[in-house]
DNA sequence: ACTATTGTATTATTCATCTGGTACAATAAT
DNA sequence: ATTATTGTACCAGATGAATAATACAATAGT
């Protein structure tokens, strides 16, 4: 499992984002145990405190829960995961239109450009 | 002219981004003079140094140039502005697909959801 | 009972960002 | 010539992010 960070945002927010995506994508399946904070931190070449902070955020959101000494687990609430997935997709779509409109594209123009982009660059 | 910043990224990067958008949108038209660093800083409730840093970035990118004492101007290179606009639009479209694929949507599914989102929420 | 592993808390340090204040050089306006 | 405004540079301080190094409580495994 690879971890990549950009430098323009706090790392712990990027970690939280990526872990959330892995849960949604099923890479960390429902109900399963995550690697320990220390393992994940080593994997991401990050301080355990930073990893801890990111995971605590997801816990607050209800996507994770931790059992004191056995480890940290993905929620078993499939419906919650579905909702978050759908909510994120909506946000992504809305942000797409918002940004395109900022650039002076109408919504139909934005869609047209997206379709063209879809056909071409698949790298 | 209003300025809004989120707290998850450095302010000067957000300023650079917003000024770039204003140039592309024609709010700061080609060749015109910008308000002074101090004016813009006051307008955005930001330290002049922060504004200066953001504008210096755009200068490095060739979107602005400054005449020592008369002020700072938008480039007259319309073609450059067009290119940047188009490049940004491409980036936005690619990022849209990238994020949707991370959420487990295929490209056609992503487009479908975008079309639905387009019809509905226009707030 | 003992040990190792778990999440968690604490403290100190480094670093970039941002602010605030000041200063300087160049020149347009007077 | 003088003045005001321009971009620009510099420095000190405050804040938050991230690292580093520990330490502790709880419990599963032995």
Image: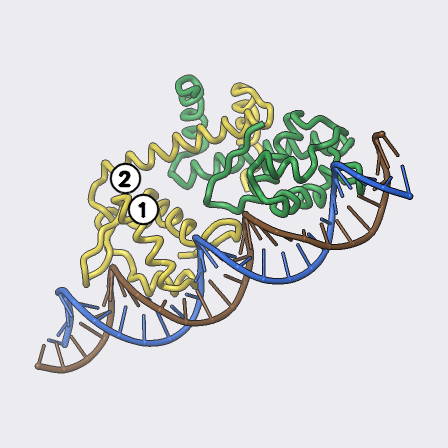
Chain colours: A green, B yellow, C blue, D brown
- Residue neighbourhood size for the residue with mark 1, other residues' Cα within 10 Å, grouped as few (<14), some (14–19), many (≥20): some
Q: Residue at x 42, y 34 (%)?
A: A106
Left or right: residue A59 compared with residue A1 = right
Q: Residue at x 35, y 46 (%)?
A: B20
Q: Quadrant location of the C terminus of chain A?
A: top left
Question: Is the residue A39 above or below the residue B20 in the image?
Answer: above
Left or right: residue D5 compared with residue A55 = left
**C-beta proximity under 8 Å, tags 2 and 1:** yes
Residue ID for mark 1: B23
Left or right: residue B101 compared with residue B91 = right
How far is disc 2 from disc 1 in space, using C-alphas? 8 Å
| Residue D4 x/y as whole percent | 23, 75
Subunit that carries the residue with mark 1: B
Residue ID for mark 2: B81
Subunit that carries the residue with mark 2: B
Image quadrant where residue D23 sits: bottom right
């Amino acid at each position: 499992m690879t971890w990549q960070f950009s430098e323009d945002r706090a790392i712990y927010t990027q970690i939280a984002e990526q872990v959330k995506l892995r849960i949604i994508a099923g890479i960390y399946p429902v109900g399963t145990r995550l690697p320990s904070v220390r393992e994940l931190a080593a994997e991401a070449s990050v301080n355990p405190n930073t990893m801890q902070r990111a995971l605590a955020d997801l816990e607050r959101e209800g996507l994770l829960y931790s059992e004191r000494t056995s480890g940290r687990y993905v929620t078993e609430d499939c419906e919650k995961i579905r909702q978050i997935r759908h909510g994120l997709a909506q946000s992504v779509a809305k942000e797409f239109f918002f940004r395109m409109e900022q650039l002076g594209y109408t919504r139909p123009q934005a869609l047209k450009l997206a379709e063209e982009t879809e056909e071409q660059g698949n790298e």
